[in-house]
Amino acid sequence: MVDIDRFYELLNEVCDELPDDFFRELHYGVQLSEEYRPSPYAENGDLVIMGEYTRSRQGNRITIFYGSFARTCGWMSEDQLKDKLRGVVRHEFRHHMENLAGMYGADSLEHEEKEELKDILYARNSK
């Protein structure tokens, strides 16, 4: 796994690929946390939060969790890691763009994620 300084450089490279308009009303930008963030629904580390979009009265932000990448992607080459990071960053930006558009219904990524989580938990409990 690359160290956090190199990971930060990769994060900046991935963000530089995006149009400036994507950053509109992203008041706190894209932040990097050293934290490992297991899902509150995790069992034995099976669900890990890699990134998070937060909207609040104080402002919007995207947080990427280096610790989560380090724990789950440590075996990846730098190119593979950058591709994974790119996917997570774009996923979080989709949340941001949907928020700006006022999209919260059945077509939203937030709704899709809730449905996926229901499926995961149902499958886990059916074993």
Image (spheres, rainbow, N blue to C red):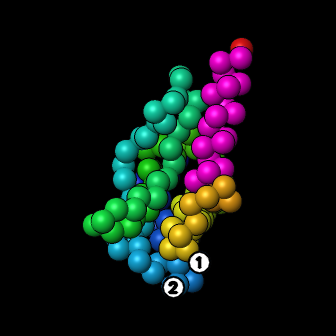
Mark 2 neighbour density, 10 Å: few (under 14) some (14–19) many (20 or more):
few
Q: Which mark is residue 121?
A: none
Horizontally, is 125 left or right of 93 in the view?
Answer: right
What residue is shown at x 63% (from left), y 28% (from top)? 121
- Disc 1 versus disc 2: distance between alpha carbons? 9 Å
What residue is shown at x 42% (from left), y 41% (from top)? 36
Outermost residue to the bottom: 20
Outermost residue to the top: 127
- Please tell me in which quadrant of the rendered image residue 6 appears: bottom left
Q: Position of residue 85 (x, y in %)?
A: 57, 58
Outermost residue to the left: 58
Indicate the secondary structure of the residue bearing disc 1. loop
Q: Position of residue 66 (x, y in %)?
A: 44, 50
Horizontally, is 87 left or right of 53 in the view?
Answer: right
In the rendered image, the vertical position of residue 110 relative to residue 37, given as above or below: below
* Residue type at tag 2: Asp
Indicate the secondary structure of the residue bearing disc 2. helix
In the rendered image, the vertical position of residue 31 relative to residue 73, given as above or below: below
The residue that label 2 is drawn on is 20
- Can residue 89 be seen by looking at this rendering? no
What residue is shown at x 68% (from left), y 25% (from top)? 122
What residue is shown at x 58% (from left), y 66% (from top)? 103
Which span of residues is magenta-colored? Answer: 110-126
In the rendered image, the vertical position of residue 56 relative to residue 49, given as above or below: below
Mark 1 neighbour density, 10 Å: few (under 14) some (14–19) many (20 or more):
few
* Residue type at tag 1: Glu
Q: Which mark is residue 17?
A: 1
Q: Position of residue 25 (x, y in %)?
A: 41, 77
The number of numbered badges drawn on the structure is 2
Residue 10 drawn in magenta: no
Residue 113 drawn in magenta: yes
